[in-house]
Image: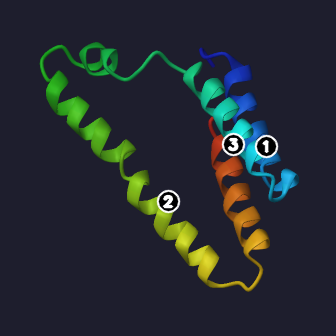
Amino acid sequence: MENFPLAYLGTSLCIMMVPMVKCSEYSVTGLLVTAQFFSGMISGGDLPLPAELSPKFPATIYALNNMVSMSTGFIAPLVAGEILEHGSNAITQWSIVSSNSQISSNLDVL
């Protein structure tokens, strides 16, 4: 693993702690901002990537990379919406959504 492991674990721990602070909006906001801080330490961005993979087709690789990575922008709300629809306790349902985020964040560490 080339990247700094604290970045992955820090992001994951911050997301994991969100359900623990319950309905404290300042604590949740602080944890999410801290998670983004750790997430920013994972890489310097995606702009150098296409040119490193293929000097002949960087635009095509960049487009495919963005297509796959931005698909979470519509898949994640669909999954969260399905979880939130099938429950009566909103805090419990949001805890499940947060746990799913934490699990997917931990997959990067492996």
**Image x and y of residue 67, in percent:** 28, 45
User: Which numbered tag is attached to residue 27?
Assistant: 1
- The numbered mark, 3 or 2, whose residue comes first in the sequence reads 3
Horizontal side of residue 36 vs 89, given as left or right? left
| Quadrant in which the C terminus appears | top right
- The numbered mark, 2 or 1, whose residue comes first in the sequence reads 1
Vertical placement of 93 versus 20: above or below? below
User: Which numbered tag is attached to residue 79?
Assistant: none
Q: Give the quarter of the image for residue 75.
A: bottom left
* Residue 109 seen from this side: no
Given contact means CB atoms under 8 Å apart, are the residues at marks 2 and 1 in contact? Answer: no
Q: Amino acid at mark 3?
A: Thr
Q: Which residue is mark 2?
A: 76
**Image x and y of residue 103, in percent:** 70, 50
- Along the viewing direction, whichever of 51 and 41 lies nearer the viewer: 41
**Residue drawn at x 53%, y 68% as measured from the top left:** 79
Q: Which residue is mark 3?
A: 29
Horizontal side of residue 87 vs 76, given as left or right? right
Vertical placement of 75 versus 69: above or below? below
Q: Is the residue marked by circle 1 packed among few (<14), some (14-19), or many (20+) residues within 10 Å? A: some
Given contact means CB atoms under 8 Å apart, are the residues at marks 3 and 1 in contact? Answer: yes
* Residue 23 seen from this side: yes
Given contact means CB atoms under 8 Å apart, are the residues at marks 3 and 2 in contact? Answer: no
Q: Give the quarter of the image for residue 46.
A: top left
Q: CA distance from mark 3 to mark 1?
A: 5 Å
SS assignment at label 2: helix
